[in-house]
Every structure is written in C-alpha cells, then in structure tokens.
Amino acid sequence: MLSVEHLSKYYGNKIGVKDLSFRIGKGKVMGILGSNGSGKTTTFRMLLGLIEKSEGKILYEGKELDFSDKCLFGYLPEEKSLLRDLKVKDQVFYLARLKKMDDQIIEQQLDYWLKYFQIERYKNAKVATLSKGNTQLIQIICALVHQPKIIIFDEPLNGLDLENVAMFKKLCQKLKKEGKILLVSSHQYNNIEDLVDEVVYLDKGKTCFKGNLKMLKKKHPERIIIIDREEGYEEDKGIIDIEYIGNKTLLKVENEEIAKSYIRKFMKEKSTFSLELISLQMMIKETLNERVD
Amino acid sequence: MKELIRFSIKRRFFNHATLLLNILLGILVCGVMFSDQLIEMINPSMLDNQIIYVDLDERVVSLFLEMNQEGITFIRESRNEDLLKNHPKAYLLYYENGYKLESQYKIPDEVIQGIEGLLNHLHQSMTLGEMLTPIDYEIINQKIELENIVKNENIEMNSDKQNLIFMVITSIYFTMLSFSTSVANEVIYEKSTRQLELILTSVSAKTHFLSKMVVGWMTIFIQMGILLLDVITAGMLRILFDEGKGLITLINKLNLFHIEENTFIELFKHLSIEYDFIIQIFFIMIFLMLGILMLQMILVVISSFIANIEEAGNVQGPFYLILLGVYYFALSLNTPYQMSEGIGFFCSFLPFFNMLFMPCRLLIQNVSILELSLSLIISVICMGMVLSKGPSIYQRGVLDYTSRGFLGVMKKTLERENEKEK
C-alpha cells in the first residue's frame, strides 16, 4: 500500500502541490490527472525523492519512504529522456546497472520486454534511429527492467499509435495482475478511463476531486443516453446537452429519473440505445467549468 | 558511482572523435620525434648555415673567417653572375662605392643590421689595431663584466626560468579550460536530454556530482597516460632507428637545449633527477589538481542551471573570458618581485589563483613548508565548502527547466530565503 498524506510542495509563495492525500493498494492503478502545471510532475518527483517535500508524508507498507531502495520505483518521464547516440541495449544496461542489477538479469529482462513489445530487432539499434512510438516503448522498458513495485508513468501515451496504446493498456493489466502499484498521468482521458481504478484531479496544485472512479461516476447524478440515430433532438426538460458523434446522438440528462423516462420513450419507439455513466472527460470538463463560474 | 564513472569514461574515450584525436596525437608525437628526418625529407637546406660569399679586401675577409659567427658560414669568393643563381639562399658581400649585400630575395632587416654590426666591429678593430700598441689594444678590447649583487638570493630568475614559467602557466590554463569545461558540458548534455531525471532516481545528486569530479580527474590522467605512451613508443622507435642521434643534433642546431650526449641512452644515463625537483613537481601537480577540481566544481554547479546547449554558450563565454583574464594576470606578474612579496605572493594563497601562482613560485624560489601548507589548507577548506553546498544547489539546478539561468534561479532562491526569514 502506498499512502500519501497531506503532501505539499511550495516554491516560495507559489504552490506546487497543496495538501494532497491518497492511498493506493497493490494491483491498482491511480490516475493523477490535471492540466499543465497542475502539480502532477511535482507529485511524481516528490514520490521519487528527486525534490524535497515541504510538508506531509509518503508511506509504503506503513513506513515512511527514505528512498534508500532505488528499485522500489520505476519511472517513465513525460519527455524523451534517452541518450540518442546510444544503442538500445547500452542505454537499458546503463540505467539498470545504476539500480545495481546483475548483467545477466538485465539481459534476461531486456530480452523479455523487447519480445513482449515485439521490438526485438531494435536491441542493437541506436536510439536516434527509432520512431517516436518505439522510443517510448524503450523508455517504458527502462522503467520496468528492474522489476519495480511502484511504477510511475508520466504521460505514457504520448507518441503512441492506436496499436501501441492497446499494447500499453494490456501491459497495465499485466502489471496489475502482478500486484504492482501504478501511478499514471495523461491528458488522453478517454484512453485511460478504462485503465484507472482511482483518480486524483489536480488544478494549480490543489485537489479538485479524488476517489474510486466507478464510485465517483455513480455518485454523479448526470447520465448519458447514446441513441443509434442521427435525428435532431431539441433541448427539452432535463436534457443538459446534446452531442452528435457520427451516426449516434449523445443525450446528457440531469439525473437517473429523467434518464429512465427517456429510456421508456425510446423503448416504445423501439430505438437502439444504451445508458451510460458520465465519462471521466465530462466530469473533468464540468469541474473546470464550475471553477471558472 | 562506479557505473557512472565507468559509463562516462567509456563514452569519452570510445568515440570516433576521441579515437581520431588520439591517433593524430600519436602521429604528431612521432612527427616531433622524427622531426630531423621530416625536415631532411621536405626541405633539406632548411637547417643549413647561412652562406655569405665575401669579395672584399684580404684583411677584412680573414677577419670575417676568424669570427666564427654562429649560424653563418663566410666563404671567400670572387664576384660572378652564377654565384647566387646556384645558391639562392646565399648572399654576396662586396665593396663598390660602399658595402653592398647582394641576394636573390629581399633580406630581412635584422640580418642586414647584423652584418652592418659585424662590419663596424671589424673596421673599429682594424683602425684601433693600426693606431694602438698591442698592449693598449688589449686594454681597450678588454671585456667589461657587470656583476649583479642580489640581496634576496632565494629567488633564481633567468630567461630559461621565465620561459619555463610561461610554459607552465599556459599548460595549466589550457588543461583547466579543456578538462573542466568538458565535464560541465557533459552535465548540460545529460540535463538537456532529460537523462539526468532518470539517473537521479537511482543515485543521489551528491553521488552524481562527485562522480563528475572523479571523471574529470580520471580523464586528465588517462589522457596524460596516452600521451606518455605515445612519447615512449615514439622514443623507442627512434632508439631503434638511430638511438636518437639525429634528433639530438637537431635540438643542438636549433639551440632549443644544449645536449652534450650523442644518443638517448647516453642522455638517460647522465640524467640526474634531484630529490628537490621531484618534490617541486609533486606540489605543482597537487596545486594544479586542486585548482582544476575547484574550477570543475564551480563550473558544474553553474552548468546544472543551464537548460539547453545554446544557453551554455551565454554562461560559459564570460567564464572563459574571466579565465583568460586570470591567465594574462598571471603572466604579467611573472617577475621576481611580484612572486616574492608582491601581488603574486598573495595570490599564491588564494584558492583557484594558487594553482597558477604557487607552481610559478615553486619554480623560481624556495617556498617554505609553512607557506605551502597554508596555501593547501586554504584551498582544501574552500573546496570543502563548495563540496558541502554544491550538491544541494546542483540538485536544484539539474531539475530546473525554467530557463531562468543560473543567476535567475539563484536570485529566486535568495528571494525565497529572505521571505522565509521574514
């Protein structure tokens, strides 16, 4: 279990992160979300011990972290962090050796992950020759090669195509099954929505909302009805928003009761429809609108 | 730390540029070691004595021939058309309504002035020889010697020593400049590629900072070692070739040093290295190493605030200018007075400055153990201070990507400190 208690970081009068608390257990994924400059990277850096926290505690298995165990965390930074003139093998070996790993184990792990991502052919290629997506995969390997217990993925989907996004999701499921703790930040809310168990949304260092994503969605009164029709709907009582996506229409309604009344109507019309909870992206959008208001 | 050092050293020495540079260095050392052969191959007449054909009065010619002027060979020869055509480097001296010096190409002024001096001297000698008795002539020609009574005999300064000091200062300057900046550039590269962010999740900023210092030092030793190996190899080849006879002849001919021995082996046999000289070299090396380390520390700390390679030029440029200023400052103070009681004396106790001034003092005078110790202690204390504060500033710097630069970040840091105090 990783617990963060009242974690704060101040840069003089400026708030980096203020009073952040969350708990995340083994085999769970925590989404640390927020706009640019909201404090996500600062949080990660405090967790990694790269910067000192101003206040609060970071506990792992009930004990405060002293950062002596350099293999506890695996870290994928937001930006490209590889030395372009090195070969993939040399880069991974260098970072793994810094974690005091044996060469034999590094070799095994490297081969395993290259095979997993189906990029074995790049083992001896120079980093500079790799595509953006493959570079990101190599960075992910660097974060995983020492078999960390807690993995931080800062914007992991940057530069990944659809195929690699699917592969990344599969990887997260695998890591979850292995009992790893995953902390993920991303702006691609649609892509990580089905990945995260818990979320924390930060804005200018402060926590806007947090908790179990499913519970948060359920607690949210609004519902979404997706109808397989392109017909125009007029704003009616209880409908907050209408959105047309392809040949589907999304109706956002105020609460479950209103949603049920529309469902009855659609059933009579024998329309094809589905009722869904509000999406993570919508929740965030609403939170931001509320803050602007 | 071991892996950081191993990785850095490997990257520095096992790359195409360094390999090529070291090959070129080897060729250069071989070139120097076989320079006489190269000269023989390219321009055999380059080292020949200057020939001056003299077509003058018999008495003047015999006086010229007696003079044994170094680097000039006088030959009695009558004027003819083909003389200079066959020897384009030769001059022809004759008298026709005054002295004339004929040559294929324009003769440098200093050569003309030299020959004018010789002619004047000959004329005076001949006139005096005709006018005076041999005893009077002897008295007038007696060489006057001026003895310098030195109060402070502790200092030994001559042109050779001054040249040596100039060489030492220049070597130290370029060594510190090249090695300390290469370490700083490595930090900038690792920071700009964000590799440092990954490294610092495995090692502390202090370890990383110290590893850079060790790498800087080791690079110096390895590079010096490579150079030494080149010299030994080229020297061995030369011994196999002709035991170094040709090179020694060339050195003597060029007046670089006066070597009495004929071969390298004879030279090594007669080479006596005094204990004091070894001690001198030892202390010079210590001050040099401490100075470079200090400079590296400061430069690496400053470089940690540089976000990209473009910004590096803006920060390092003025730093190099300051170093250049210090270099000329040291050269200007290279006098016995300045080094024994003037500014040079005081600078030999200041950290960083002492790496230039203390070696100079050691070369020209006996520096007391007390002075040496005091200078060393001051340096070590100062380095300890940089070492204690450096890593924390360094850690702040390497994770700062605000492009505020060193001064900007330091200003902000100081502002925060003031706010905290309030």
Image (cartoon, rainbow, N blue to C red):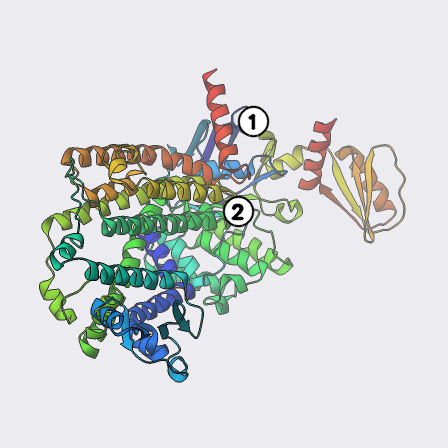
| Residue situated furthest front in the rendering | B131
- Label 2 amino acid? Asn
Across and down, in percent, residue B99 comes to 37, 67
Residue A244 versus residue B209: which sits nearer the camera? B209
Mark 1 touching mark 2, by CB under 8 A? Answer: no
**Up-down: is A203 above or below A75?**
above
Query: Neighbour class for label 2 at 10 Å: few (<14), some, many (≥20)?
Result: some
Chain containing the residue with disc 2: B
Relative horizontal placement of residue B124, taking residue B18 as reference (left or right): left
SS for tag 2? Answer: loop
SS for tag 1? Answer: strand
Q: Say which residue appears at 49% left-offset and 69% top-offset.
A: A121
Across and down, in percent, residue A98 comes to 36, 51
**Up-down: is B18 above or below A176?**
below
Res A9 seen here: no
Determine which residue is flagged by label 1: A14
**Up-down: is B28 above or below A15?**
below
Q: Say which residue appears at 54% left-offset and 58% top-offset.
A: A135
Relative horizontal placement of residue B227, taking residue B193 as reference (left or right): left
Chain containing the residue with disc 1: A
Q: Say which residue appears at 46% left-offset and 33% top-offset.
A: A3
Residue B17 versus residue A162: which sits nearer the camera? B17
Query: Neighbour class for label 1 at 10 Å: few (<14), some, many (≥20)?
Result: few
- Label 1 amino acid? Lys
Across and down, in percent, residue B76 comes to 28, 77
Determine which residue is flagged by label 2: B308
Residue B110 versus residue B144: which sits nearer the camera? B144
